[in-house]
Image (spheres, rainbow, N blue to C red):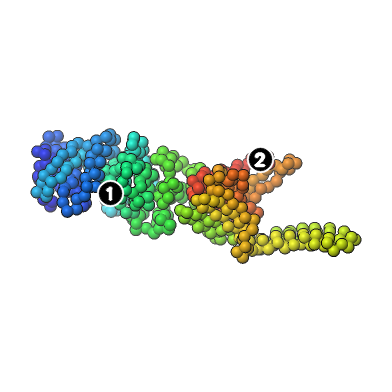
Amino acid sequence: MDQLVNQVLCDRYRIQSLLGHQAGRKTFLAKDLQTKLPVVIKLLLFGPSFTWQDLKLFEREAEVLKSLNHSAIPKYLDYFDVETELGKGFALVQTYIESKPLQDWVQSGRTFSEAELKAIAKELLGILDYLHSRQPAVVHRDIKPSNILLGDRSGHSLGQIYLIDFGSVQTTVQDGTRTIVGTYGYMPFEQFGGQTTPASDLYALGATLIYLATGQHPNQLPQRKMQILFEDRTNLSQSLRDWLKWMTEPDVELRPKSTNQALEALETPDLQKYGLSSAGARKPAGSKVTVRNTRQMLEILIPPKGFDVVELIAKAWIGLIAGATLILPAAIIDIQIFWPIVLLPVFVTIGGIFHTLFAQVRFCLTQLEVSLSHEILGWKYLYLSEARHNIFELELTHIFRRKDLEGNIIIVPPQIKLWAGTKEFELGGRGRLTKPELDWLAYELSSWLDLPVARTDLANLAKK
């Protein structure tokens, strides 16, 4: 039992039990002797582990709570100096919420359905919207299962959701300091560098929902390129898995831009406009296309198309006819300089066949440049490049019909087009990529560039 239990602070608050503690701080359940209501008292005491940064955060928590008025957030009641047998310090009093943390629910064996996870997400997004919309924005910085309370079920209701513990709160995006606060596993990458934005809270919310879905803290799950790998441990729909991956993107620029955008995407089954097509979010089974995705570069390598009997016969036949039509004039004129012209179609045909069998396509995006090249044994040709800042549109088409200059309908093969300045970068033409591969690569490009995918309506006929 804690030494302070049964003591009365400020001639008003009788401490009843210890709720939690961490370095330099303790949290107690107490009774307000005036109102006869239970309250929560946080104590910050001077001692060996005390730092002035702790006091700064403690005072900030009191000031922020004093300014907030939300039914799902504890209310500020009092703040005063204390002197106890454990030392001097400060006390913050707030309303007591009689509910269990999500972490306790999970540890007691409770599981959450997909509908319940969405309900929890919506409630928390509503709370975060209230916080992030304030001037200046309030960023919680320590959203996790132990800081979210859930009341008992009421009829068909999941139970009331509450967000507590504002001890790590930040009131501006840049406050001149680089304080690293939060909980490992729920902190996004940028928070380790002391740079926190409202999107950092969205990451922590996504990580919390992953914990509820898997029963494991995110730091206990495998990762790839700092992305939490949780999909195979859940029975969630693909759209919700995609949404959670979006929320927990390691790169803050690739996460939802706001709570409203996250909520809109959660409530709609059509995630394509956010670059989150459930079909395109992952590499199709059997695909030989490789993608290397880092913060500095996105590289797509498309292997040679390989042996296609019909295409090779067609190319050989065209080359044979073209060469034959020139043999007769060459024989009549009998000018030696004319013979290379005769052989030109043959060389072109052989080159086309060689390209089909051995050429790979390399597409590369960096922070400065976009480039596309064809390669055979390390030799690059058909090279095209442009400055990255000139990129303005990403387009995905499947089988598309259009009219040529003479009004005839022609078929445009499935492809991805990236427009940069006046240049057009094409991926997947001539059947090199399947529809699932195109969807997947469009998702990767959209995520890396933070650029929506423009999708061509297959039913329309466009004029050239």
Compare residues 92 and 398 and report the one nearer the observer.
Answer: 92
Residue hosting label 2: 462
Mark 2: secondary structure: strand
Pinpoint residue 401: horizontal percent, then vertical percent. Answer: 66, 44
User: Would you say 320 lies left or right of 104 here?
Assistant: right
Pinpoint residue 456: horizontal percent, then vertical percent. Answer: 60, 43
Pinpoint residue 374: horizontal percent, then vertical percent. Answer: 62, 58
Residue drawn at x 61%, y 56% as measured from the top left:
373
User: Would you say 88 lies left or right of 455 here?
Assistant: left
Residue 350: quarter of image: bottom right
Pinpoint residue 35: horizontal percent, then vertical percent. Answer: 14, 34
Say above or below: 422 vs 316: above
Answer yes or no: is residue 421 visible: yes
Residue drawn at x 10%, y 42% as measured from the top left:
8
Disc 2 packing (10 Å; few <14; some 14–19; many ≥20)? few
**Distance of label 2 from label 1 (alpha carbons):** 56 Å
Compare residues 48 and 15 and report the one nearer the observer.
Answer: 48
Q: Residue furthest bottom?
A: 377
Sequence-wise, the earlier of marks 2 and 1 is: 1
Disc 1 packing (10 Å; few <14; some 14–19; many ≥20)? some
Residue hosting label 1: 146
Mark 1: secondary structure: helix
Residue drawn at x 70%, y 46% as measured from the top left:
410
Q: Indicate the amino acid at tag 2.
A: Ala
Say above or below: 1 vs 360: above
User: Would you say 17 lies left or right of 431 here?
Assistant: left
Answer yes or no: is residue 440 visible: no
Say above or below: 353 vs 168: below
